[in-house]
Image (cartoon, helix red, strand yellow):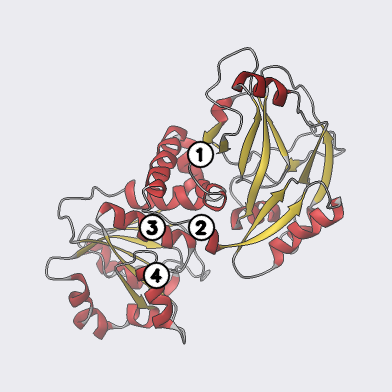
Amino acid sequence: MSLNFLKRSMSTNIPKKIKSIIYSSHNVDDCTSVLSVLNHSVKNVNENSIVLRTLAFPINPSDINQLQGVYPSLPEKTLDLGTKEPSAIAGNEAVFEVIKVPEKKESKLSIGDWVIPLHSNQGTWTNFKILENENNVIKVNGLDLYTASTVSVNGVTAYQLVNKYINWGERAGNEWIIQNAGTSNVSKLVTQIAKAKGIKTLSVIRDRDNFQEVANDLEVKYGATKVISESQNSDKTFNKSELPKILGDEGTIKLALNSVGGKSSSSIARKLEKGGLMLTYGGMSKQPVTLPTSLHIFKGITSAGFWVTENNKKDPDEKRANVAEFIKLYETNKIISSENELEIVNWNVNEDSDEEFLNLVKKGITSSGKKKLVVLKWH
């Protein structure tokens, strides 16, 4: 069967209805209460339209914050979906399969390509997407389902944290990154990306009964150079006697990555070399970032915020390049699959009722544990 025949036959496979999770209001206390399922008609599809079939979408903390109404970036609500109140489709991240491409003009996309949205706020908790501009997606062929569905947030965040702010390579093998929340998905990607670049990593994790088991996993499986506990991180004696042994005679920490805040953030900042940088991209402890005055005056460190959504908005071409480099690392076994970092929730698209679909998303929002990935079962 020729590719042209396949394209022609698949181009007729345009959905009559699209099923999406939508919201028109916000609720801080119970964000699931604002969600509903909408079966909306497909409008304005023509020979130049691109049709995407959703393969999987994660439920991210930023998605939940949007539903709560507390996230700084929110999608525009519209009446275009045919609702009584202006509404938006929930979700910011997903991986899609191209099932229709423009029929009478050349396209960079081919049927069967896997793609992710270039921008946030596009509405991804849905079974189909219709595009008029192929430049609004990025190809992710080469990644597995789990890594492709989370590369836009976790993957690009980790890649930029390592590569965007520091000029590495002046002292190869002696330059370090320190990061707290060492068991987080982003932190695990940071250690892998850094290792591929020849940068050493010192990961800080919570004290726990199985500390050594977790530390060994982070070092052996995910490439962390050394893992220490939060109690060691804040211990002055450890910092004076043990830390120099870990870093080596010429080792220095140029970059600190903070996603915890509070005491943990000040402790990792203290370990920075003169002129070092601390980037804050989260605040799991819900405590403020408080740094000693001496770090600013005598060590000249810089403390800055990091928000991947804003970075990508300012420079979408950088995101494209980051994803391309990430895929290269994955294909050369420098980055392992994100499958084990996720809890899979299956949506049987052709069998589950609207209520069952809505309930599985609500449960994905409210249940604890690993990040939930909704995987669409089409057959």
Q: Specify the label residue 141 is tagged with.
A: 1
Label 4 or label 1, whichever lies nearer to me, is: 1
Q: Which mark is residue 338?
A: 2
Asked if disc 2 and disc 1 are in contact, CB closer than 8 Å, the reply is no
> In the rendering, at what x and y percent does residue 344 appear?
65, 60
Residue type, label 1 = Asn
User: Is residue 281 among the parts visible in the rendering?
Assistant: yes
Give x and y (percent) for residue 271: 26, 69
- 185 and 258: which one is in front? 185
Q: Examine the rendering and report whether any part of residue 123 can be seen.
A: no
Residue on which disc 3 sits: 190
Q: Residues within 10 Å of mark 3 (few under 14, many from 20)?
A: many
Question: Which of disc 1 and disc 3 is earlier in sequence?
Answer: 1
Q: Which residue is mark 4?
A: 218
CB atoms at circles 3 and 1 under 8 Å apart? no
Q: Secondary structure at mark 1?
A: loop
- Measure the C-alpha gap from mark 2 to mark 1: 16 Å
Lower sequence index among marks 4 and 3: 3
The residue at 50%/37% (across/down) is 313
Give the SS element for disc 2.
Answer: loop
Please tell me which residue lies in front, 94 or 114.
Answer: 114
Compared with 372, 125 (above or below) is above
